[in-house]
Image: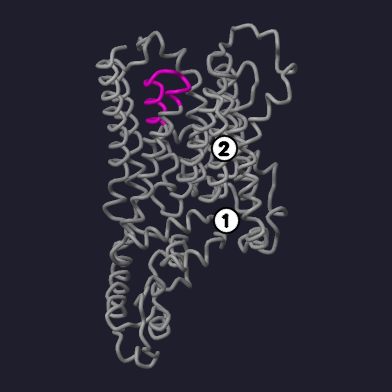
Amino acid sequence: MTAGAGRGTAARVFAVGLAANLAVVALYALHVHEPNIRYDDFNFLTLSRTWGHAAANLWQPMNDHAMPMSRLAAALLMQVVGGQSAIPAAAQVQGPLAVILGMWLLYVFVRRELGLPIYGLISMTAWGVTTAYIQAVTWYSGSFFILSLDTFLLALLAAQAWRKSGSARYLLLCAACCAVAPGWFGGGILAGPWCSIYLLPVIGVGPGTRANEPAPARGPEHRRWRDWLPSVAPVLGSVLFLAVSLPRTAERIVHASHYEGKTVFQAFDLWAGVADTVRTLADNQVLGAFGIYRASAFSWPVALAITGILVVAGAAWWRFAPYRRLILLGLAIVLASDVLTYGARAEWGYARTVHTWSRYHLFPHLGLVLFLAGGLPRVLERRLRPLPAGGLTRNQAAAVLVLIAVALSCHMRRSIRSHIFFPAQIAVLERVERVDKYCRRLGISGDTARQVLGFLPFPLGYANDNAWDFLRGSPEPGTVTVEQARQLLPR
């Protein structure tokens, strides 16, 4: 391929990828236009209202998640916004931006793995232009799940680079990303094991290994022990995070209040996790990929029948697909994420954890996309006639644009119906902003002001969330007493 053709291909790929990004923007435009923050957002934002507060609360768990990266991200947002009334808009943008970043990371990974841009574009569209995990996109606290996934994708790219180059620095980078991923969201602790699965030197699952090719003479049982060592590096990154975080957070996580007196180990139910995984595959995760949302669960016989069909189809796909490493990785992401999530949430009930909390469908949806990507070359290589040199034809670009339009039309209805807007929240934040300006002008500290102002309920917050906690006060407070502040501040 000539340099001119290469530039043309790059421009075409970027244009189609940008169209997929714009579809995500369109899908969540109403949420950004009429934004809100809610519930757990209050904790993240008020406890990180300054860099000092973020540092002091860096290792305070959110329920059973230690999320220091999220605390720092919240502090950055609070420093960037001009005033409290702008907080919802700034927070609402984070989810779609994180999706767009993840789309391009996934594109690069699949493009390098399968060799052609068409497969990367299909994968980024199938993962990004969706409402399967809508709560993670439209809820500020849930958007940290996406940032954890983005970090996992960075780890995968580093692992992929090691497989292609053999350079140790990529293994170190992979381990570092695996150490950071759970800092956004506890589920990111699985990034290390997942990257290790991707790196396993197992015959029959690697890129380019066709299902009908004979196994080489030296099978997995003859591999030397040092051939397996690189696959340990990502897990060491996860272990590093645990070594740093657990001494600071273990007591609070193990005895998190929502377990109502039980420890996290007592609350975990493996069999309930397996059962709920079977049901959610039938109820939500496969149907959700097509924009179908069920308000109630299938009965057990129907769920088992659907899951059985999926298992048979998956086995056939494994035999059919030429890139089994991606299939194995995708399957590991789906099953590990679902079983651990629903096992830990077993006592809260299937309807609540599966149907209400779509944020937990984020990682499984990525797993489904990777699972399908492993067979794309055999499905498309003749129909779309990919260029031998790795280009993107006009027909291929047109096919992806049609896929983008179909995905957008399938998911738009659910996005619109899920939108909520509370003008009262903006009014409360505008009130806080006005008082904050008084404090800055008069040299009144935030703590002094809050002693005067009392309690102001926060719309879409928990019962004890005081909106005055958003007030930062003067960065250089004077010697204004509480009594003086009482006379100076408007109520």
**Part of the protein shown in magenta:** 110-126
Give the class, few, some or many, for how many residues have Cα within 10 Å of label 1's Cα (few <14, many ≥20).
many
Name the amino acid, label 1: Ala
Is residue 394 or residue 461 the one in the foreground? 394
Q: Quadrant of the C terminus?
A: bottom left
Query: Main SS of the magenta segment?
Result: helix
In reply to whether residue 57 is colored magenta, the answer given is no
Q: Which mark is residue 66?
A: 1
Residue 462 pos. (x, y %): 47, 67
Instruction: Answer above or below: position of 201 versus 297.
Output: above
Tag 2 or tag 1, which sits nearer the N-term?
A: 1
Q: Which residue is mark 2?
A: 172
As helix, strand or loop, the secondary structure at mark 1 comes to loop
| Number of marks drawn | 2
Q: What whole-number distance in Å separates the C-alpha atoms at marks 1 and 2?
A: 23 Å
Name the residue at 60% across, 26% down.
308
Instruction: Answer above or below: position of 62 versus 361.
Output: below
As helix, strand or loop, the secondary structure at mark 2 comes to helix
Is residue 65 or residue 249 the one in the foreground? 249
Instruction: Answer above or below: position of 381 versus 191.
Output: above
- In the shown orientation, is residue 56 left or right of residue 197? left
Name the amino acid, label 2: Leu
Residue 243 pos. (x, y %): 66, 51
